[in-house]
Image (cartoon, rainbow, N blue to C red):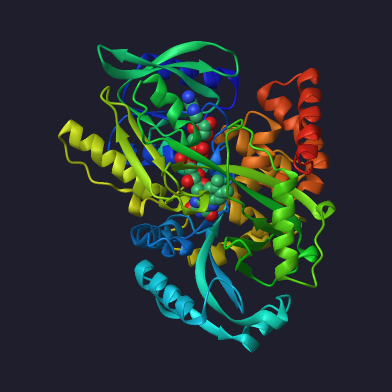
Amino acid sequence: MPYNSTQRQDIVNKLAQSKYDILVIGGGITGAGIALDAVTRGFSVALVEMQDFAAGTSSRSTKLVHGGLRYLKNFEFDIVRETGLERAVAYRNAPHLVRPEKMLLPLTENGSYGKWSTSFGLWLYDVLAGVKGQDKRKMLNRKQTLEREPLLRDEEIIGSGYYAEYRTDDARLTIEVLKTASAKGAIVLNYLKADELTYEGDKVSGANCIDVLNNETFDIQADYVVNATGPWVDMLRSQDVSLNEKRIHLTKGVHLVVAHEKLPIGQSIYFDVADGRMIFAIPREGKTYIGTTDTNYRGDKANPQVTKEDVTYLIDAVNEMFPSVTLQKEDIESSWAGLRPLIHEEGKDPSEISRGDEVFESESGLITIAGGKLTGYRLMAKKVMRLICDRKRITRKCRTRRTRLTGGFQKPKELPVYLKEVEKKLKEANLDDSKAFYLVHRYGKQTDEILHIYKEKNLDHLVQAEAYFSIQYEGVVCLEDFFSRRTSKLLFDISHVMEESDQVMSVFEELLGWNKGRSEEEATKMKRLLNELISFEQ
Ligand code: FAD
């Protein structure tokens, strides 16, 4: 991935001059998965993303790799099975980014889940997802539940289900999939918008693209064009005059972040609220995050906002479930809102609409993939590539089941050993060894490269080495890319962001040639962003 304007220009030239087998539009997890699948089957691939990679829904999820227990309620067994099985694949290919996470599902006197139905549901969940051994669900009685989580509403608890899920860093997962595709030959570029589809006769043949960083335009040509633009898919389908009754239905989901002391739960909890919906509370890196909401959405797709109503809904739900906790709006340190690109089903409420995915092929040959989940990204890519192989009348096997992502390990059990090595290296460099966990669970084995940069450049702060790394290898073009989607500090370490912005500014100036004016602009932008994350609209 490029890091300065000359290298970016080289990529642009390459994109403009070649014809690709496949052009993927959209650099979220869906597009990333398709690019990786296509390139590992031996196709030439270009991928364009109009914002930063993962800036759409793929950095705004609940950050779980899960089978979707609640889909059992809607009898969506296929999704539960597919995504449930897929969790283990995601873990094996990127154990630094996909980690096992035990989940507690408390059962209450008047809650929507009964003991027997939950026991059966979780058993079925394990069976569908092939869960084995110690990870199989356990049903806990009232006493065991309250021992495990004393903060729960004591008088109403009748027991709980305790079962296995996985958690992730959605943006980094997307970026590592893209980097893996890029390492295998895919050409991927962010801040490049597919502005207009182009046609040869009545067949789609590529896109006229606009470089968002300098407004230059050029065409990319391809035999197959895949529309993987998530919440935006219908815009390209409209251009292609192929929008039909199957439309995208956007619903917004909000998450709030508070200090762990404010909601000091011992493990992740999945609980039901008065309106029958389910909410997650997940401890992470000294914080707890809570989500999500599910409301119809029609506003700006690039910038969904958290409203006061969203905040009240989530805070009330938490305060109700954990009576000794009294969360207030002022306790919120950060937040995010994302849009679910669901496939519209007439007459259904947001929470009832299926989370399944669907592939549409238009008369012009435009292939659109919509719906789905982060967890199932590899399977969605497989569907698209199967269609393209069928159209080309060729057979090329999918290879992503065993494609290790950049930073990954041969086997997950190598991770704890590596973690110890990193702790040792940090100590030797007189750095805080507790940073090892942070580094290894973001960069995996690429932590070596970050420590190498730190030493070689004789830097004052480790975060500067992270900035070098992410500008050089991960397509970062501004501070927000770095603090949001490469390090997630804007979500989980917001109090250090301004101080660290000052520390990394020199790295951006050196590598990207920023002058004083640009640095000041970026600092102002960061201040505005920090404020936005804790100011809520009416
Ligand atoms: P996106 O990530 O939105 O990517 C589409 C990209 O296309 C965008 O980056 C956009 O900028 C780009 N684009 C649009 N138009 C153009 C153009 N013309 N040219 C170039 N680029 C363009 N799934 C899970 O598995 N686990 C979870 O815990 C989970 N939680 C969720 C919680 C919430 C609140 C939400 C909203 C979703 C959640 N999901 C979860 C679902 C999951 O996040 C999405 O299914 C997934 O991220 C969608 O990815 P995508 O690549 O299809 O879309």
Residue 406 in sight here: no
Image point 72% across, 47% down: which residue? 309
Q: Is residue 141 above or below residue 378?
A: below
Q: Image quarter for residue 517? A: top right
Give 21 or 381, whichever is nearer the viewer.
Answer: 381
Give 485 or 253, whichever is nearer the viewer.
Answer: 253
Give 196 or 371, whichever is nearer the viewer.
Answer: 371
Q: Position of residue 160 (x, y in %)?
A: 57, 79
Q: Could you tell whether 447 is left or right of 236 in the image?
A: right
Image point 37% across, 39% down: which residue? 34
Q: Position of residue 432 (x, y in %)?
A: 76, 58
Residue 67 in sight here: yes
Q: Position of residue 302 (x, y in %)?
A: 60, 32
Q: Image quarter for residue 110? A: bottom right
Q: Position of residue 227 (x, y in %)?
A: 39, 30
Q: Image quarter for residue 524? A: top right
Q: Is residue 272 above or below residue 229?
A: below
Residue at the limit of the structure toward the front, as seen here: 347
Image point 27% across, 36% down: which residue? 42
Q: Is residue 81 above or below residue 529?
A: below
Residue at the limit of the structure toward the left, as seen here: 393
Q: Quadrant of the C terminus?
A: top right
